[in-house]
Image (spheres, coloured by chain):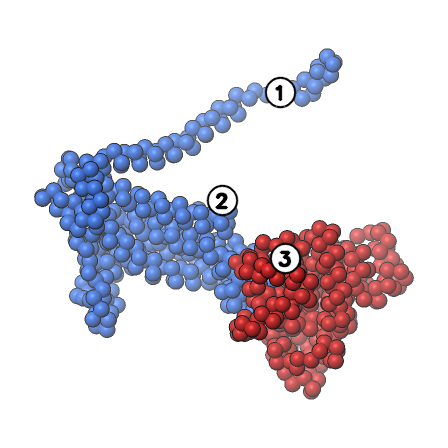
Chain colours: A blue, B red
Amino acid sequence: MTSATVTAAARFGRAASRVPDVVFRSGSGVLAWVAVGILGLLAALLVANSGQALAKFGISFLTGTTWDPIAGIYGALPFIIGTIASSFIAIVLATPIGLLTAIFLAELAPRRVAIPLTFTIELLAAIPSVVFGLWGVFVLGPFLSRTVEAWVVDTLGWIPIFAGPPFGVGLFTAGVILTLMILPTIVAISRDMITAVPDSQREAMLALGATRWEMITNAVLPYARSGIIGAVILGLGRALGETMAVTMVIGNRPQIPQSIFDSSQTIASQIATTFNEASIGLQTSALISLGLVLLVITMTLNVIARLLVWRVAGPQGTS
Amino acid sequence: METAVRRPDEAIEAPPERATPLAPPDRRPAASPLDIVSGEIVVEDLNVYYGEFRAVRDVSLTIPPRAVTAIIGPSGCGKSTFLRTLNRMHELTPGARVEGVVTLDGIDIYRPDVDPVQLRRVVGMVFQRPNPFPTMSIYDNVTAGLRLTGRHKRSELDEVVERSLRRSALWDEVKDKLRQPGTSLSGGQQQRLCIARALSVDPEVILMDEPASALDPSATLRVEELIAELRRQYTIVIVTHNMQQASRVSDRTAFFTMGEERAGYLVEADDTVRIFTNPAEQLTEDYISGRFG
C-alpha cells in the first residue's frame, strides 16, 4: 500500500500552486454578485424613499389624475397613460416593420446585402437619444404635422382619439421617435430568432411543396414565434423607459391625453424634467414613487421577454 | 434560390398523354395506385457542383417505378447530394447546380417551365432526423401539405389524416391524441409521422435520406416494415449507410463511391440480390464484404 501511495503522489500529485485559481474564482465571483447587489440596493432605496408619498396617497397615487406640487396632490395616472400610449404607438409601428425587416435579412437577402444592412440597422441603436430628440423637434415633428397628422385629422378626425389639431409635438411624434429607437432591438433579436430555426424545419416545409413565402409563414415564424414576441417585449421595455428623446417631443403636459396628437407626458420624462426643482419631502418622494412604478413595469416585461427568447434560442442565445 | 437550373440539352419532350406535367396530385386521376405505373426516374450524365467543386460525377441511373431503390456507399460519396437533385432540394444550397438530365415519367424536371414547388408535391422527401413541426399537433403536421394547396375542408382533412397515418402504420398509436403536439411522440413515431406527412399530399416518389439513422433498432425495424408495405404504391429511393438495411428493404441497389478529386460516382446498380451476392464490380464486392468504406 505504501509503495502505491508514493507512486500515486509522484505521478499525479499537485505540481503547481492553486492560489491563482482560488483568487481568480473568488474575485470574479464577487464582482458578478456586485451587479445583483446593486439591483437589490436600487430597489430597496426606491421602496424606502417612495414611502412618504405612497403612505399618503395609497392606491390613489396610481389612479389620481392631478399632479399639482403647489397643492401637494400627486396622482400618476396621466404619466402612466402617457407612458403606455407612447410605447403602444411605437410597438404598433415597429413590430410589423421590424419583423418584415428581420425576415428579409434572415431569409431573403443575399449575404452581401444582408451584412451591411444589418450593420446599418444596428448602428441606429448607437445614435444618442438626445440626437433623436433634436431631430424629432426640428425635422420629424414639423414633417409629421404637415403630412401624416394633417391627413389623419382630416380623414379620421371625427374619431376622438384621432382628433386634431396636429401640432407635431405630442404622443404621436413621441411614438414615431420611439419606433425608430426600438427598431434595432426588434430587428436584431427577431433576426437571431429566425436564424435559430433549424434548416430541417425549412426543408420539411419545402419538401411538401411550399413556396418560399409559405415556408416562412408556416414553418419559420411559428417556430420562432415566442422568441419574436420576446423581441417585441424587449423593444417595449426600452420604449417605456426612454427619457430624453421623448421629453423633447412629447409636449410635457401632465394631463391625460384625449387624442394621439395631444401633448402628453411619460413617467420617465416627468422625473427628468422636474426632479431638479423638486422640494425635499413629499414631491421628491412622489417622483421616486414614479420611478418605482416604472421599474416594476419594465422589470416584469423584461423577465417575460427573456423567458420567451430562451424558449427559442436557449439561455445561451442573444439577450 | 428557386431559379431553374438550365441544362445543356432539352431533347426530351413531355409525352402527349400527360397534358399537365407535374400537376398537383389533386388534379391527377384518383386511380388506384396499380393501374397506372408511373414514377419512373431516369438520370442521364448527371453532374452536381457546389461552386467549383464537383460532388457527383457522370451518374446515369434508371430508377424503376413502384419499387424501392437503395443508394449505398461510403460517407461523402455524394449519396445525399444525388438524392436531393431528384426533387431539386439541392437548390437550397447556395452555389449548388446540376448538369445533365433527370426525367420523371419522361418529363425533364430541370426544364425551365417545371416549378420546383410543384415538383416537390410529386416527389416527397423524408429526412435523416425526424422533423415534425413543433408548434403543430399531430393532425396539423399531417395536413400541413394539404393546407398549402388551400384545402381546408374538415371532412377531407380528417380522411387524409386517417389514411396517411394508417399507411405509415401510426394510426393505432395516435388516433386518440391527434391534437397533441407532434413532438410529444417518440423518435420512431415522429419519423413515421414525417412519413405520413410526406404521404398526405399523395406523391408518386418518396425520397428517404437515411430515414432510420437517428432511430433505435426497434424503431428502425418499424420504419423498414413500413417501407416494405409502401413499396408497391410508391417509387421509393432510400439512401442508407446500413448495408443490411439496403438488402432488407430494397429491390434495386445502386452503389456509389468517391473517386478522383472527391467526386462521388455510381459504380453499379443492379437488383439488390445480385449486388449483395454476385456484384459485377470488384469495388462493390470489396465494399459489401467490408474491405473498405
Relative placement, left or right, of B185 versus A196 is right
Q: Is residue A203 left or right of residue B36?
A: left
Seen in the image, is B20 located left or right of residue B35? left
Mark 2 lies on a secondary structure that is loop
Cβ–Cβ under 8 Å for marks 3 and 2 = no
User: As drawn, which residue projects farthest toward the left?
Assistant: A70
Find disc 2 in the rendering and name its residue: A315
Query: Of residues B253 and B155, which is closer to you in this image?
Result: B155
Residue B92 appears in which quarter of the rendering? Answer: bottom right
* Residue A205 placement (x, y as % from top left): 57, 65
- Answer few, some or many: residues within 10 Å of disc 2's Cα (few below 14, many 20 plus, some between 14 and 19): few
Dividing the picture into quarters, in which one does residue B49 lie? bottom right
* Distance CA(mark 3)–CA(mark 2): 26 Å
Badge 3 vs badge 1, beta-carbon distance below 8 Å: no
Instruction: Please report, as a chain letter, where disc 3 is located.
Output: B
**Where in the figure is residue A44, as x and y percent of width and height?**
30, 33
**Residue A231 is at least partly visible in this image:** yes
Residue at the spot x=49%, y=60% of the render?
A222
Residue that sits furthest to the front in the current view: B176
Closer to the camera: disc 1 or disc 2?
2
The residue under label 1 is A15
Mark found first going from the N terminus, 1 or 2: 1
Task: Give, as a three-letter code, the residue at label 1.
Answer: Ala
Compared with A132, A283 (above or below) is: above
The label number, if any, that marks residue B116 in the structure image: none
Q: Which mark is residue B190?
A: 3
Instruction: Specify the amino acid type for callout 2.
Output: Pro
What is the C-alpha distance between the residues marked 3 and 1?
52 Å
Q: Is residue A93 left or right of residue B146?
A: left
Mark 1 neighbour density, 10 Å: few (under 14) some (14–19) many (20 or more)? few
Callout 3 amino acid: Gln
